[in-house]
Amino acid sequence: MKEAIIRKKAIEILTKENYISWYPSPVRWKKEIDIFGVFDIVAVKHLKVPRFIQITTLSNISARKHKVLKVFNDVLPLMSIEIWGYDKKKKIFKVIVLN
């Protein structure tokens, strides 16, 4: 499933929870554009710690978790880091909170 479709579904969920979400705009000549080289979405709610979200498919959760921990393991207590794996069959996200 394409990242843009999964991201759209994640943004809809976050919007319903009254979060303001941001993600980098796609650029033609770059294959991958991530926030801090890892995250796909930043979601903010009034006076709450920003949520840094990596979106992926359900089967790639383990690889994404490894990618996030490799870069951000030392600052986990300071950030809200989540991995959202989309289950295409059930049409829901499995959310892994890393801190």
Image (spheres, helix red, strand yellow):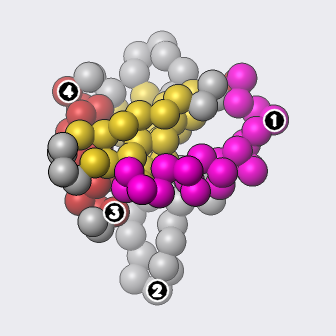
Q: Quadrant of the C terminus?
A: top right
**Label 4 environment density (alpha carbons within 10 Å; few <14, some 14–19, many ≥20):** few
Mark 3 residue element = helix
Disc 2 from disc 3: Cα separation: 17 Å
Q: Which residues are magenta?
A: 57-77
Q: Nearer the viewer, mark 2 or mark 3?
A: 3
Q: Earlier in the sequence, mark 3 or mark 1?
A: 3
Quadrant of residue 76 within the rendered picture: top right
The amino acid sitting under disc 1 is Asp
- Tag of residue 29: 2
Q: Nearer the viewer, residue 16 or 57?
A: 57
Circles 3 and 4, Cβ within 8 Å, touching? The answer is: no
Q: Residue furthest right?
A: 74
Q: Residue at x 34, y 63 (%)?
A: 3
Disc 4 from disc 2: Cα separation: 33 Å
The amino acid sitting under disc 4 is Lys
Per the image, the residue denoted by label 3 is 3
Mark 4 residue element = helix
**Label 1 environment density (alpha carbons within 10 Å; few <14, some 14–19, many ≥20):** few
Q: Earlier in the sequence, mark 2 or mark 3?
A: 3
Q: Nearer the viewer, mark 1 or mark 2?
A: 1
Per the image, the residue denoted by label 4 is 16
Q: Earlier in the sequence, mark 1 or mark 4?
A: 4
Q: Quadrant of the N terminus?
A: bottom left
Is residue 58 a member of the stretch shown in magenta? Answer: yes
Q: Nearer the viewer, mark 3 or mark 4?
A: 3
Q: Residue at x 49, y 50 (%)?
A: 61
